[in-house]
Image (tube, grey):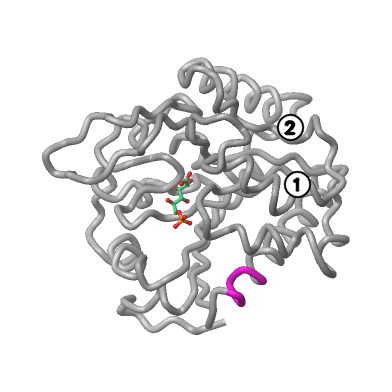
Amino acid sequence: MIQVFATPDALADAVARHIVASAAEAISSAGRFTVALSGGSTPRAAYSRLAYGDLSHQLDWQRTHVLWGDERCVPPDDPRSNYRTAKEALLDRVPIPANQIHRIRGEDDPQKAAGEYERELRALLVCESRSSSLDLVLLGLGEDGHTASLFPGQPAARETTRWVAAVSPGGSRSPLTAHRSPDVWRVTLTPAALDLAKNVTFVVSGAGKAHTVQQVLEGPFAPDLLPAQAIHPAEGRLTWMVDQAAAGQLRASRAST
Ligand code: 6PG
């Protein structure tokens, strides 16, 4: 499903309300809500909306677990840290128990951090006969078609067994994909984990992403070139929430919301 919003503000508001609605559904059916936040700058406005105003009281933070779809391998107080972005915009302002914030330890060796995060994720999801899936995963989209830290030509983008992988900055690039690799080591959820989620929502804003959005949604299936195309929740819902600028090159007319 593709939802188009007139402006970045309308998109941010809708994403925040989507998170609140997803939480209410999960807590009502299973007594808790697990959400993997996206990195990057796009979702920051939505995170802030969850921390202020009427929405801040509509999410039961005592029953919420926050994780990340990926992290840069930098210290948690580094400006590049996805954890720091969410901490500043949201987590420092809501009453979520500290042990329900499951950050990826970017300050550790990438392979070690990936292994620890996978163990923590499996322990959280596959226990007490609970279903092994995240309730909501938010994903961004890079202009090169990457999502989370699944970059074109990188092995992690084709991982179907491990739930978490470390991605090197100089990772293997096939001749087909002279795309950028990450600037630092990353740790990322893989398609194997993302496809287990009950609800995967891409959040994309800005005209700079319009060509990539059109290629991912309407172009030929080429997940090695466009890793965002590799994300297909097995039983979950896949939603795109984009602003009008990012939807600008979509051929099919989409109702603006
Ligand atoms: C990251 C993200 C990455 C991001 C996209 C879009 O750690 O950078 O996980 O996948 O979502 O690159 O980033 P922007 O929202 O900043 O455009």
162 to the left or right of 180? right
* Residue identifier under label 1: 91
Is residue 71 on the magenta stretch? Answer: no
**SS label for mark 1:** helix
Observer-nearest of 73 and 215? 73
Q: Position of residue 149 (x, y in %)?
A: 42, 40
The quarter of the picture where residue 183 lies is: top left
Observer-nearest of 161 and 228? 228
Is residue 11 on the magenta stretch? Answer: yes
Give the residues in magenta. 9-13
Magenta: main secondary structure equals helix
Q: Is disc 2 surrounded by few (<14), some (14 to 19) or many (20+) residues within 10 Å?
A: few
26 to the left or right of 165? right
Observer-nearest of 206 and 224? 206
Q: Position of residue 28 (x, y in %)?
A: 84, 52
Asked if residue 83 is positioned above or below residue 137 in the image, the reply reads above
| Mark pair 2, 1: CA separation | 25 Å
Q: Amino acid at mark 2?
A: Arg
92 to the left or right of 19? right
Asked if residue 5 is positioned above or below residue 231 in the image, the reply reads below
The quarter of the picture where residue 34 lies is: top right
* Residue identifier under label 2: 130
Q: What quarter of the picture does the C terminus occupy?
A: bottom right
Looking at marks 2 and 1 on the same chain, the residue that comes earlier in the sequence is marked by 1
Q: Please, which residue is most extreme toward the left here?
A: 175
Q: Position of residue 96 (x, y in %)?
A: 83, 42
Q: Amino acid at mark 1?
A: Leu
Q: Is mark 1 within 8 Å of ligand 1?
A: no
